[in-house]
Image (cartoon, rainbow, N blue to C red):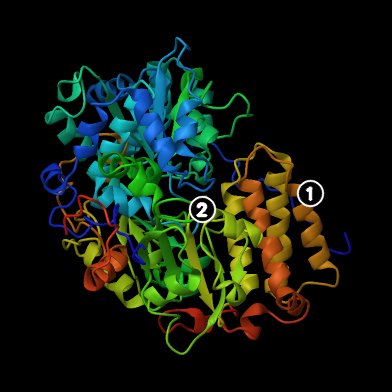
Amino acid sequence: MTDLLSPVLTRNWGHDRSWTLDSYRSDGGYEGLRKALTMTPEEVVTEVKDAQLRGRGGAGFPTGTKWSFVPQDNPNPKYLVVNGDESEPGTCKDIPLLMASPHTLVEGIIISAYAIHCHTAFVYIRGEVVHPIRRMQRAVEEAYEAGLLGENILGSGYDLDIVVHAGAGAYICGEETALLNSLEGKRGQPRLRPPFPAVAGLYASPTVVNNVESIASVPSILRNGKDWYAGMGTEKSKGFTIYSLSGHVANPGQFEAPLGITMRQLIDLAGGIRSGHELKFFTPGGSSTPILTAEHLDVVMDFESLAAVGTMLGTKAMQIFDETVSVVRTTLRWVEFYKHESCGKCTPCREGTWWLVQLLTKLEAGQGQEGDIEKLLSICDDITGKSFCTLAEGAVACVTSAVKHFRDEFEIGYHTPAWEHLPYEKSALFAVAPQGAAA
Amino acid sequence: MSGHEFETYFEHSGGIDTTDTATAIDETTIAELKQLAGRYPHPPSALLPMLHLVQSVDGRVSPRGVEVCAEILGLTEAQVSGVATFYTMYKRHPAGKHHLGVCTTALCAVMGGDALLQTVEDKLGIKPDETTSDGLFSLERVECNAACDFAPVMMVNWEFMDNMTPDKAIALLDDLAAGKEVHPTRGAALTSWKDNERVLAGFNDGRADEGVSAGEASLRGVEIARERGWTAGAPDERN
């Protein structure tokens, strides 16, 4: 029987100077690495595979399996690239990890790189967060000074260099092939797959791209064992993960729990919906995952259960909105986000998001007309499945799910502005002048 | 199309501003740009960091910056410009000493981000993508900045100003204008956007030890677990 919350990655975040090597080591840091270096790389892959760790960046692909796809008979260097481009709306777990405990990631990188026979690893962090980058840069420096990076790590004969790399503002670079293009110094546009990065990734060499949280989970698996890890979670979604709650709850924040907790339990831990209000809708895993409503409060927050109700666990980013919020307004803002972040490569996404914004802008202003909802859905149908990457799917998911659950609100957009139907000032956390007139 | 006229999207098709040729790039900068190129197995990988360094010197992506990056990496200037104009953090016109970002993606917008943006616009008399005439502030409407549990969020020089309110924003702008020392909620004391662009280029400023380890929201779950004695049941559990 496991406890409702299970701090592992977050456990040391409040410790004094938690970002330093001394603090991390005093809490058992780098013991997972010592253990890994007594094993063969193949044994490390097997350990992570058997722990059944699944990717924490959205897709949930088994991490150890991804590692095993790296063709070791390929003569090119093998690369590990850590995806720290955390930009999916609602997602806010990797950035605090980089700020509070960058050594967890450094240790995870060394173990993971060792497992795939890699000698150069990259950490790609979105550029708009200077302090986490500063802390990561310093952690890597400290690791070199302590013989944890560079040549002959801890006397093992294994060599590894880590390069900390800042992005420059592009959500699309969270998509792994776009990230690789960006890391090659190009525009961050996705590549056609196959070939998959494991075969031809960075510099056309075998490359593993993993999310920050996935790699940060590795040291604990090595330290405590696969059985401990796989002993938490549900049948196919093992272990623990960080759930991020934001929005209209009393106490938003990060909650690290075994997979299998429910939304009702998470909201309770966050102190409930803000006083005097009730839940209207939420995203289970960022804005790219179809929204859910109060009827889904008891759904288990794991990969399979959320798929069963037509959505996704995604990045486990729960954005919570109460009854004051106009779903037309949030949908427009999300689609504006996708329009802004569309890389422009695929016409259905580049033009389609642009069209969706125009229609939704009219609906928000109460200037829609009969048939607009059908047109919205028709454009969504023209976008989905017709673009290279999943940015397009995300852009569509927030629209179609909002229409599915709140069609009446979109119909109100045929005659009444959203800010008159649901006055915007009621959703804000502080007193603001009524909006709308200036909108 | 039953009445709606759709417009085509060519809003941001402008390139690098080649009319403003001012530059402060000197031999030291060029040596540092070459140093960045040397950090990667394939030098073109350094282009993003190099453009951050160009901005830290010239306050924007300058024509000279494009030229030297292209020379060092063996790329054409068109290739470098193509990259520079793809990413929103690269500025085509001089940014202010302090670069402000107000998040207006759905969640922050709803929780007060729209009102915050209006407050900042009114206070400074500028719109997003503009710089004040004294060069002190530039403003940007930013997309989700990965701090949703601290909404509404503002960024200054890409440091976090969490749980913002209009009153706090006005005090912040007054303090910065008066040259007072301002600390982000999570981060190092504010100096300038250019200084932080240098960090993003990969030149650590030695200030990792400033600021808190984590904000209150980041510690929410771990605090509850501590109070209730909940653990992950690890064999080596130490607290």
Q: Residue at x 46, y 67 (%)?
A: B108
Q: Residue at x 39, y 30 (%)?
A: A45
Q: Please state which of residues B163 and A74 is positioned toward the viewer in this rendering.
A: A74
Residue B129: percent from the left, percent from the top?
Answer: 47, 54
Residue topped by disc 1: A382
> Label 2 amino acid?
Glu
Residue A29: percent from the left, percent from the top?
Answer: 19, 43
Q: Quadrant of the N terminus of chain A?
A: bottom left
- Disc 2, SS: loop
Give left or right: position of B20 versus B57: right
Q: Please state which of residues B192 and A178 is positioned toward the viewer in this rendering.
A: A178
Q: Residue at x 52, y 50 (%)?
A: A236
Farthest-out residue, top: A75
- Disc 1, SS: helix
Return the chain for callout 2.
A
Q: CA distance from mark 1 to mark 2?
A: 36 Å
Residue A93 occupies quadrant = bottom left
Give left or right: position of A256 versus A18: right
Q: Residue at x 26, y 52 (%)?
A: B234
Q: Is residue A386 visible?
A: yes
Residue A304: percent from the left, percent from the top?
Answer: 58, 55
Residue topped by disc 2: A235
Q: Is residue B25 visible?
A: no
Farthest-out residue, bottom: A276
Label ID, residue B98: none
Marks 1, 2 in one chain = yes
Give left or right: position of A277 versus A329: left
Return the chain for callout 1.
A
> Label 1 amino acid?
Asp
Q: Quadrant of the C terminus of chain A?
A: bottom right
Q: Earlier in the sequence, mark 1 or mark 2?
A: 2
